[in-house]
Image (cartoon, rainbow, N blue to C red):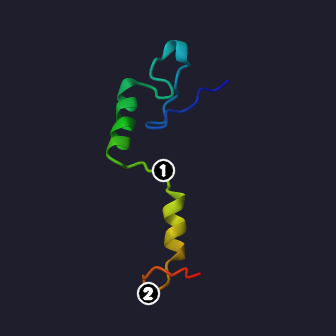
Amino acid sequence: MPLAPCPICQKPVPPRPENTSQPFCSRRCRAVDLGRWLGEEYRVPDRQAEQQEDELPSDGEPRRHDA
């Protein structure tokens, strides 16, 4: 079975018993990934904010939902 690539450097990643940094190939790549999360380079999409943006009219004013 081929080894999975490291998500940072693409080198083959040894299985967990041989590598405590799994799924990364090394502690360095694990730290690079953490730094990217802390630096907000990775983001989880906010579906609710996207839906609210879609509901705005073209003039930028929120629509009124009068009953």
Split into 4 quadrants, where in the image is the N terminus?
A: top right
Q: Which residue is mark 1?
A: 44
- Location of residue 66 by image quarter: bottom right
**Front position in the image: 42 or 29:** 42
Q: Which residue is mark 2?
A: 59
What amino acid is found at the position of numbered circle 1 in the picture? Val
Q: Residues within 10 Å of mark 1 (few under 14, many from 20)?
A: few
Secondary structure type for disc 1: loop
Up the image or down, 35 lies above or below 55; here it is above
| Mark whose residue sits in front, 2 or 1 | 2
Secondary structure type for disc 2: loop
Q: CA distance from mark 2 to mark 1?
A: 28 Å
* First of labels 2, 1 by sequence position: 1
Q: Residues within 10 Å of mark 2 (few under 14, many from 20)?
A: few
Coordinates of residue 12 in the picture (x, y in percent): 52, 28
Who's the residue at 53% across and 12% down the image?
17
Identity of the residue furthest to the bottom in this view = 59
Identity of the residue furthest to the right in this view = 1
Split into 4 quadrants, where in the image is the C terminus?
A: bottom right
Lateral position of residue 1 relative to residue 65, left or right: right
Coordinates of residue 33 in the picture (x, y in percent): 39, 37
**Front position in the image: 42 or 21:** 42
Lateral position of residue 46 relative to residue 4, left or right: left
Who's the residue at 51% across and 28% down the image?
23
What amino acid is found at the position of numbered circle 2 in the picture? Asp
